[in-house]
Image: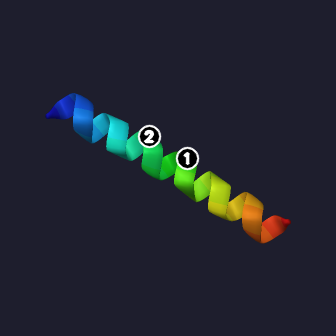
Amino acid sequence: MEEARHLLATRGHVWVVVVVVGEMR
């Protein structure tokens, strides 16, 4: 459970970065 939760948090962070980059572009 903890690993899945950590993975989800990591993917969420990556998603945020992608969105920010897309907005800047």
Q: Residue under circle 1? A: 14
Give the Cα distance between marks 1 and 2: 6 Å
Task: Report whether 22 appears left or right of 4.
Answer: right
Label 1: few (<14), some (14–19) or many (≥20) C-alpha neighbours in 10 Å: few
Mark 1 residue type: Val
| Residue depicted at x 57% and y 57% | 16
Element type at mark 2: helix
Residue, far bottom: 23
Which colouring convention does the figure follow? rainbow
- Where residue 8 appears, as percent x and y from the top left, is 34, 44
| Residue depicted at x 69% and y 62% | 20
Task: Report whether 8 appears left or right of 14.
Answer: left
Q: Quadrant of the N terminus?
A: top left
- Where residue 21 appears, as percent x and y from the top left, is 75, 58
Task: Give the number of the disc on residue 10.
Answer: 2
Query: CB under 8 Å between callouts 1 and 2?
Result: yes
* Vertical arrangement, residue 13 with respect to residue 2, above or below: below
Q: Quadrant of residue 15?
A: bottom right
* Vertical arrangement, residue 1 with respect to residue 20, above or below: above
